[in-house]
Amino acid sequence: MASIQQLLRAAHQQLADVLLLESREARNEARMLLSAVLAGVSHAWLISHDQEALTAPQQAAFDALLQRRLAGEPIAYILEQREFYGLALRVTADTLIPRPDTETLVEAALTKIPATPLLKPDDPHQGCQGHGFQILDLGTGTGAIALAIAQQRPQVQVTAVDASAAALNVAQHNALQLGLANVWLLQSDWFSALNCPQDGAPDRARYHLIVSNPPYIAAGDPHLTQGDLRFEPMSALASGPDGLDDIRHIVAQAPQHLVAGGWLMLEHGYDQADAVAELMKLQGFTEISHAKDFAGHQRVTIGVRGER
């Protein structure tokens, strides 16, 4: 049987050649796959035991994972895990894979949340789930955005919704694993289930901040058939001919669910900032601005609910 060192070298070369990964990335992926087979041993353990050989079942398991990766399946799906904003999240094929660009949205949201956003019991802007600063995450998927905000701001209440029951199961698992009790998960097609009873009659839930990373890729974009996107749920990626159908819906409905002066923050494509800003203007949003991702692209558009 081949040694750990020999297996890692061969896998490193295959990943680099087939997937055109940079050498460092290919080496890291090979180690991650082998670590998963060996019950999560560290990279340091692999190095210190590199002359040891795997058992036949271990090598078969490693080969199976490697073949899945060489076929293009995202490593996050193979390992069922992805780190986001310092949180280890479970990821499945029912959810979008959290990406570093989306941390821009979390950062923007955190700047708008007061350090101690506690309201008085008779505050008219209290949310359905109780008193305090209320946040809504639309299309939560793994729960990445909602959970990152909830972890950073434990004094707020975050409502996270998704139309997919399977995705909500993943988000629920992540919330429980992280011990975050200030997140409320609800199955809802955008705003459809977000009514709360007040004075005996249904009324719309109101939030101080709404965040979302909605689908924003044009339905005919060739990138949908390439790379990781081939494996991710289409419903979480594509949105109409120009990619803006879901964003139009969210922007049109958001004012009814925001308190006066409440914020709407949307992630979008690198070239969609102007279009999203115009949609917000048409719905009466003011103080419209943008936040840039790590590559310098305007990735998030921000607006304040107007008085119209």
Image (tube, rainbow, N blue to C red):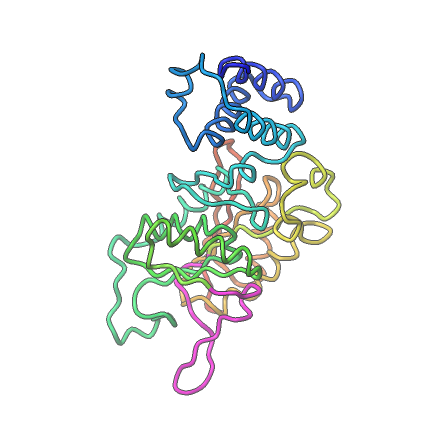
Vertical order, 274 against 245 (above or below): above
Residue 124 placement (x, y as % from top left): 33, 75
Q: Nearer the viewer, residue 227 or 149?
A: 227
Image point (41%, 87%), residue name: 200
Q: Count numbered badges in the picture.
A: 0
Residue 6: in magenta span: no
Residue 200: in magenta span: yes
Vertical order, 95 against 121 (above or below): above
Image point (72%, 39%), residue name: 225
Q: Specify start and end residues of the magenta stretch as a single range.
A: 186-210
Image point (45%, 12%), residue name: 51
Q: Residue furthest front?
A: 56
Residue 295 placement (x, y as % from top left): 51, 31
Residue 281 placement (x, y as % from top left): 55, 58
Vertical order, 154 against 104 (above or below): below
Vertical order, 286 against 48 (above or below): below
